[in-house]
Image: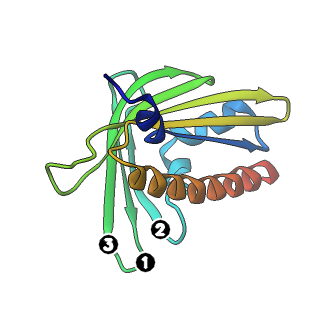
Amino acid sequence: MTDTKAAASHRLVMRRTFKASRARVFAAWTTPEVLKSWLAPGDLTAPEATLDVRVGGTYRITMEQPDGERFAVGGVYREIREPERLSFTFRWEGDEPSPQGDTLVTLDFYDRGAETELVLTHENFADEGSRDRHEHGWTGSFEKLASVLSRSARS
């Protein structure tokens, strides 16, 4: 029998509204040069992003700390409905076997006039600690995304 309360606790749902069209917010997730400008929380950067944005296509993003240490994440696109929904697996590269394995990220983009509401659902975490670390990372990345979208609106 599945413990639904425990399973639900290993799921992250975040909502954020951006001052940009749904098409622009969606493109920020599917355009490598734009993605590299925001998908790394805090003082991390994302110097490399390779995206094959199609169902079954893969992606790989490298993040770098100020000291030069690098981390890579990758996965497979599961669903693409531009500009409404994007879903992909998410796995950190590194020590194997990983207790975490693949997680699943689903992004829903809602048109709110001049703004877009993004609902991120990230699920299948091994434990609450992993979920909480990812919440921190997504929060920091979303702050950068808001700034990038704001700058590009003024350009």
Q: Residue 6 or 45: which is nearer the viewer?
A: 6
Q: Is residue 104 above or below residue 43?
A: above
Looking at the image, the residue that sits furthest to the left is: 97
Residue 112 at what x, y percent from top left? 81, 30
Q: What residue lies at 57% left-to-right and 24% top-to-bottom?
A: 85
* Residue drawn at 78 percent across, 48 percent down: 153
Quarter location, residue 52 = top left
Q: Is residue 37 left or right of residue 44?
A: right
Q: Tags 3 and 1 in contact by the CB under 8 Å rule?
A: no
Residue at image mark 2: 44
- Does 149 sit above or below residue 82? below
**Residue 123, image x and y in percent?**
43, 36
Residue 140 x, y percent position in the rendering: 58, 60
Q: How many numbered marks does the figure carry?
A: 3
Secondary structure at numbered mark 2: loop
Using a 10 Å C-alpha cutoff, classify the residue at mark 3 as few (fewer than 14 neighbours), some (14 to 19) or many (20 or more). few
Residue bearing the label numbered 3: 69
Label 1 or label 2, whichever comes before in sequence order: 2
**Mark 3 to mark 2 CA distance (whole Å):** 10 Å
Q: Position of residue 95 (x, y in %)?
A: 17, 57
Residue situated in front as seen by the camera: 103 or 33: 103
Which image quarter holds the N terminus?
top left
Q: Are marks 1 and 2 in contact (CB under 8 Å)?
A: yes
**Side of 31 where 148 appears, left or right:** right
**Mark 1 — residue?**
66
Which amino acid lies under the numbered mark 3 shown in the image of this protein?
Glu
Mark 1: give few (<14), some (14-19) or many (20+) Cα within 10 Å: few
**Amino acid carrying mark 2 in the image:** Leu
Where disc 3 sits, the SS reads: loop
Disc 2 crowd, CA 10 A, few/some/many (<14, 14-19, 20+): many
Task: Name the disc covering residue 83, or none.
Answer: none
Give the residue at x 79% y 44%.
Answer: 19
